[in-house]
Image: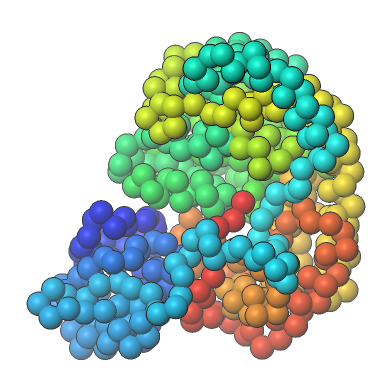
């Protein structure tokens, strides 16, 4: 199956080959007109095909898919009838959304009424007492910076020093010059991809993986080579073979409490992968945003600390305070060589010049209190994990999962490919969940999986499980029109 990518509206016109590479074929591999309409609709709804793009001419697409022109004509007719396309005489057929339906974007997931239980966002609330103290500390420090221009493209020196000191304490000697402070880990990853990747470059990524990271890769037209992460974790042999056979420019890994599976990569596998990446000249981009969320095991050392000698030279680490403290703070960082950090700062300036001084001062104060914050956060998450697993065992006993040693999610095995149907029906029952396909490198995969975070208060999970059980009734298989929000954390 072709690797999915996002086609931007700037492209304006899709070729037949472009569209074919973005479609999920039916099980028998041959499109009828209904299956073709379904595939185009799904590609549009999950963001692989943008709005207001001109679709290929009927004859061209028919030749690429090896179907009759009548099949393509029938599919386009269905898309127009259902509101997913419109035509202008002499101009062709363009993608659209039905009247009254919002694109799958930020506005689609907001629920200010509180009526819907949102189990798609894996991010807990802020530690209220510590956040208040940090705000007070930041307010006292702010006058020192108010007389300056306020721009710090590399980040506040105090915060760079605090992040570097934490890496050093965890076993990876780090200088402040090796830290770039960013607006969250997502910006950190985006900057790294922009600096180190070019359109058409190969990037190795775990399958499944963090959906926003995959979208960032697709948005930069990187070609994703998937390697599986299963219930037993990583197969080092498969990863090594993928590195040697494809020699990707980059490899994106989440070794610490992997999102979404929760797996923890053993130390010996880390050394092996660092060695293999070094041999192929591949940059390792290691996402450690969940490192501190060690629920049943000691917090792991930094990935780069396990690499031998020169194997760490092409390792770039991404982190943030979003999981350990609060996502609303939007403070993250990159740890790399001082040369790479300088180049990343130049890229960063073109995007937002600098982060908020106030937010960074709050982050400095929270970093000072992190050893107080984490024990309470971890104890809270263990209780919430227990509440979720107990509620699921009562209401959906046929589901299966492995309790992760850390992280914030369960990776549920539904036992049948019903995730998209369940997600669609769940919204109607007042619960939002994210199907496993959203985390797959290839569209349509992981349909038997569901990611359920345990970051909400304990009393939420009993009614949530009840609603999921109600939604599960009558959801036998793949839903044909999953118009779901696609924003997750």
**Left or right: 97 as drawn, with respect to 91:** right
Q: Is residue 384 left or right of residue 241?
A: right
Which of the 4 image quarters holds residue 6?
A: bottom left
The residue at the far left in this view is: 90
Residue 118 locus on image (x, y percent): 69, 64
Residue 468: image location, x then y, percent: 74, 75
The residue sitting at 64% across, 75% down in the picture is 427
Q: Quadrant of residue 475?
A: bottom right
Whether residue 379 is visible to the viewer of this picture, yes or no, is yes
User: Closest to the observer: 216 or 330?
Assistant: 330
Any part of residue 207 in sight: no
Q: Is residue 149 left or right of residue 360?
A: left
Name the image colouring: rainbow
Q: Is residue 68 above or below residue 303?
A: below
Please give the name of the residue rendered at 60% of the width and 32% of the height, measured from the top-left corner. 332
Q: Is residue 415 left or right of residue 181?
A: right
Q: Position of residue 56 (x, y in %)?
A: 20, 70
Which residue is at the front of the view, 270 or 391? 391
The mark tally for this picture is 0
Q: Residue at x 65, y 66 (%)?
A: 111
- Say above or below: 209 vs 318: below
Q: Give the quarter of the figure containing the N terminus.
A: bottom left
Residue 334 drawn above or below residue 452: above
Q: Locate residue 304, reporting x and y percent.
A: 61, 23
């Amino acid at each position: 199956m072709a690797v999915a990518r996002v086609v931007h509206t700037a492209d304006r016109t899709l070729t037949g080959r472009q569209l074919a590479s973005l479609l999920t074929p039916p099980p028998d591999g041959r499109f009828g007109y209904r299956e073709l309409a379904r595939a185009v609709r799904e590609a549009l709804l999950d963001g692989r095909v943008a709005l207001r793009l001109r679709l290929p001419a009927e004859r061209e697409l028919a030749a690429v898919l090896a179907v009759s022109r009548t099949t393509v004509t029938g599919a386009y007719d269905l898309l127009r009838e259902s509101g997913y396309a419109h035509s202008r005489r002499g101009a062709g057929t363009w993608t659209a959304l039905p009247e009254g339906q919002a694109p799958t974007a930020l506005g689609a997931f907001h629920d200010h009424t509180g009526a819907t239980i949102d189990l798609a966002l894996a991010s807990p609330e802020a530690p209220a007492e510590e956040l208040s103290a940090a705000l007070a500390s930041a307010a006292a420090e702010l006058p020192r910076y108010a007389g300056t221009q306020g721009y710090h493209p590399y980040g506040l020196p105090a915060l760079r020093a605090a992040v570097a000191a934490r890496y050093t304490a965890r076993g990876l000697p780090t200088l402040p010059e090796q830290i770039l402070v960013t607006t969250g880990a997502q910006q950190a990853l985006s900057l790294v991809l922009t600096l180190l990747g070019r359109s058409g470059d190969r990037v190795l990524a775990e399958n499944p993986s963090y959906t926003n990271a995959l979208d960032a890769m697709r948005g930069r037209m990187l070609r994703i080579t998937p390697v599986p992460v299963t219930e037993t974790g990583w197969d080092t042999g498969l990863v090594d073979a993928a590195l040697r056979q494809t020699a990707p420019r980059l490899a994106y890994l989440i070794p610490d409490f992997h999102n979404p599976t929760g797996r923890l990569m053993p130390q010996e596998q880390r050394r092996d992968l660092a060695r293999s990446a070094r041999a192929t000249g591949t940059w390792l981009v290691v996402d450690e945003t969940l490192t501190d969320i060690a629920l049943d095991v000691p917090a792991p050392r930094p990935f780069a600390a396990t690499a031998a000698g020169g194997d760490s030279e092409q390792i770039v680490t991404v982190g943030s305070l979003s999981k350990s403290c609060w996502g609303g703070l939007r403070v993250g960082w990159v740890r790399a060589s001082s040369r790479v950090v300088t180049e990343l700062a130049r890229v960063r300036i073109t995007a937002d010049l600098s982060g908020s001084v106030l937010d960074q001062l709050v982050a400095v104060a929270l970093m000072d209190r992190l050893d107080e914050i984490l024990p309470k956060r971890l104890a809270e998450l263990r209780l919430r994990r227990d509440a979720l697993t107990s509620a699921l065992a009562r209401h959906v006993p046929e589901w299966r999962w492995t309790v992760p040693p850390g992280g914030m999610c369960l990776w549920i095995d539904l036992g049948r490919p019903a995730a998209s149907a369940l997600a669609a029906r769940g919204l109607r029952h007042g619960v939002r969940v994210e199907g496993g396909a959203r985390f797959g490198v290839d569209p349509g995969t992981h349909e038997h999986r569901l990611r359920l975070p345990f970051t909400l208060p304990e009393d939420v999970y009993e009614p949530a499980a009840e609603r999921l059980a109600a939604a599960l009734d009558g959801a036998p298989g793949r839903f044909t029109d999953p118009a779901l929000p696609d924003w997750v954390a």
